[in-house]
Image: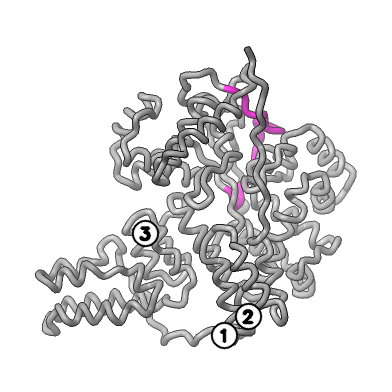
Amino acid sequence: MGYLVGLLVIALAGLTSAVLYAPRQSPVVYPPPQGSAIQESYFAFQLKSFRRSLKECAEYWEIPWYRVQKLIDNNFEHASKDLQCLIRCAGVNSGWWDDLDGLRYTVIESYFQPDEDDTCYADRTKECIDQRLSSCKTDCAKAYESFMCYLQQYGSLKSSEEYIPLTRLEAIQVAVDCINILQVSDDLLNQISQGEIPDVPEVHCLYRCQYLGEGVYDTQYRFNFSRLYIRHYDTPSPEFLGEEIYSCAQSTLEANSDECTGVFRARECFPVSDRPSRTVTILTTAAGVALDQKRCEPPIYREPYLPEIPFIQIDPADIFTCCSDVDGSCKVACESLSLVKLGADSNAKGWKLHDLRSNCAPTLTPFWDCINTTLGSVQRGINWPGRLCCSLGMSPRCQNACAIAANQTELAVGCRHSDEQRLYGCVQRQEVGDSCCATARTSECLQACKDIFRTNQTPNRQQRDLLQSTCSNNNSNILLCIKEYIEVTENTNLKHCKQTP
């Protein structure tokens, strides 16, 4: 299962950050957060420094630290291809890079401290990115050049832990947890799942729980507007950093004796980006997921599960030790097997095993016992929607762990969430999509719905038209469920400034 909302309270040293690495040019000012040097409630969100992300990635990719330190000493310049991929890994780990979406600049900004006397840092950084990324061919190069533009043009790299925003799917999981914790009634869930947000105490507290879980609200220090700005990385809203919204929200909270009601009313102070394209759609989708989880029977379209196969603990790193006991053409056929492909495509299994049987003698009993044990683990979770994401694993160990997993708990055997955020994001997307499409009454609607969730990209016109034509008559609830995935908002944050003589 995804994140569970916890109740652990930790102390932070403060949001005013020391400089870890100084760029060649003068640093520039990052808008100061409201309510700095405070204690935060720690729920589903993460706080992480860039150095920690870098060290985790170096350990994960088995890159000696002396090479990383040498890169740091050289101001990250002239990085080799593997070290460029290390920076990309740190970007994924820190939440500011995604291979599908590219650079999330509201997130990466929080890792740099601009100089207070520089007024053109944003414009310089944008120009740098536009120039450098045009010639980049790989995701590693794109992430690296984006990072270098911020290091050299935006400001100094901080040493402090910074807020990593939740993806939409992670936020949906937080909402599902809040629904379960607060025991929201089925009647109310039905209303919310249809896009209706009643103005009632239960909904007020659901909003409060959601904001707590995402780390943008604290019971003592109230809203953290710097984090709200970062939270909306897909629809940036600089208004969150203005005094007007801060004063409006504080006044609204003080005017309501009930905290839940105050939080619910204060959202009216937020920019349009949070009404309704973010929180409402998160709660709408989560309500549908929560209702699906309460069903006694699976949806009628699902194929019957295979007979229960016990979970066999296999070390994902050593899963192909079967191949080490044979040689010749048998070894070649064995090593050509891909657990990821077998786990995602049941049709691939037949011809792959035919190739194995043709090259490996039936008398190789230990070898076949090993193969059967491995394939049994793959087959056991063949209906888990997360299998489609296994190729996104950053290492063979994680990919193999995904290929034999039947849920997110088993996925954690070989895939650490902090290192595999893209994989986990895809898994959560597929699980939400599986629940969202569960009520499809026709195979055509089911397929059109599933296609929406295949990638993290905005559905194209053809996909949307097909969804509308196949699901509009008898499956309007599916259209509501996936509404958030077809809304597109143009990003316009960086502004041109007048060049000084």
C-alpha distance separating marks 2 and 3: 32 Å
Q: Position of residue 374 (x, y in %)?
A: 29, 74
Quadrant location, the C terminus: top right
487 relative to 337, above or below: above
Question: Mark 2–mark 1 contact, CB under 8 Å?
Answer: yes
Q: Is residue 206 above or below residue 117?
A: below
Q: Residue at x 57, y 85 (%)?
A: 301
Quadrant of res 194: bottom right
Of residues 391 and 217, the one drawn nearer to the viewer in this rendering: 391
Start-end of magenta stretch:
28-45
Q: Badges 2 and 3: C-beta atoms under 8 Å apart?
A: no
Is residue 398 located in the magenta-colored stretch of the structure?
Answer: no
Could you classify mark 1 by the number of other residues whose Cα lies within 10 Å: few (under 14), some (14-19), or many (20 or more)? some
Is 90 left or right of 219, judged from the image as shown?
left
Residue 326 visible in image: yes
Sequence-wise, the earlier of marks 2 and 3 is: 3
Residue identified by numbered label 1: 301
Q: Which residue is mark 3?
A: 398
- SS for dot 2: loop
Residue at the location (54% across, 68% down)? 431
Q: Residue at x 71, y 60 (%)?
A: 281
Horizontal arrangement in the rendering, residue 252 relative to residue 361 (left or right)? right
The residue to which callout 2 is attached is 440
CA distance separating discs 2 and 1:
8 Å
Mark nearest the camera among 2 and 3 is 2
The mark closer to the camera, 3 or 1, is 1
Percent x, y for residue 165?
A: 59, 47
Q: Say how the picture is coloured.
A: one colour
**Main SS class of the magenta portion in the image:** loop
Among numbered discs 2 and 1, the one appearing first in the sequence: 1
